[in-house]
Amino acid sequence: MRMLALFSRTRGRNNRVERGVGARTGLLVLDIIGTGNTVRIGNHCRLSGRIVMRGDNQTVEIGPSTVFKGSYLLCSEGCEIRIGRHCLFSRGTEIRTTDAHSVIDAATGERLNRAGSVDIGGHVWMGVGALVSKGVRIAEDNIVAAGAFVNRSCLESQTVIAGAPARVTRRGVTWNRRLQDHFTWAEIDHWRLKKRSRPELQAQPSALEQPPDQKAPEVDLKRGSTP
């Protein structure tokens, strides 16, 4: 197993990383300020990019066999980010639970852009430069086109979501990491079949869900290595 991470900025207590079997982080920067935050990485993930957390008791959970190629995640204001299994995030993709600044109604003084958790289902491909904004849910088995700005939920599966702001531009499509002219049903549904037949690909439960003598692997954020 290869584990290489830069903990560029960590301040607070009881922040931890849990990683599954075979998880690899080519260059994953964790920037965490707060207390009781958890980054949970599923089995056989391959991740590079940056995860920023600001606040307390938040969770970023990444499902098994998901790949990041230079992605940016911002989890703040008491929210969570959950990403399903077998996702592929291309370079320059972003997920944000907050705009990081307030948009205010000038007449009432009310904040308009409130934060919200983000939930992305399994087998979602995000193209280069796509951004998923606060409070968005995306169903499993979808394609988010390059450069899309997704600021509303998409609860349909097998669609292409494109544009700024994004909308469904095509239905009845799926995707595969391989390049070939024709796919069998088994190849199309490979990620679903693995979910049923390979239980070892399931993300490890957190320490709270395991017996006391079987805690999930943790990384000491101050030292940047496992105990």
Image (cartoon, grey):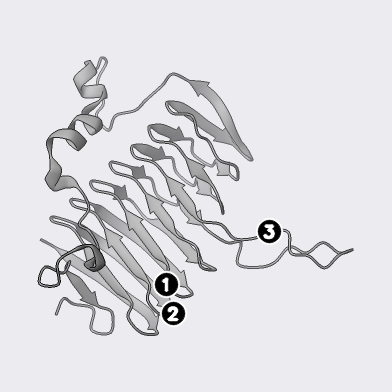
- Closer to the eye: label 1 or 3: 1
Relative to 209, is 212 above or below? below
| Quadrant showing the C terminus | bottom left
Viewer-proximal residue among 223 and 107: 107
Density class for disc 2 (Cα within 10 Å; few <14, some 14-19, many ≥20) is some
**Residue lying at 31% horizontally and 58% vertically, measured from the top left:** 48
Compute the Cα span from label 3 to label 2. Answer: 22 Å
Q: Which circle marks residue 57 in the picture?
A: 1
Relative to 72, is 4 above or below? below
**Residue lying at 59% horizontally and 60% vertically, measured from the top left:** 115
- The spot of residue 175 in percent (x, y) is 34, 28
Q: Earlier in the sequence, mark 3 or mark 2?
A: 2
- The spot of residue 225 in percent (x, y) is 18, 77
Residue at numbered disc 3? 113
Residue at numbered disc 2? 34
Apparent side of residue 34 relative to residue 115 in the rendered image (left or right): left
Q: Quadrant of residue 22?
A: bottom left
Relative to 2, is 149 above or below? above
Disc 3 is placed on an element classified as: loop
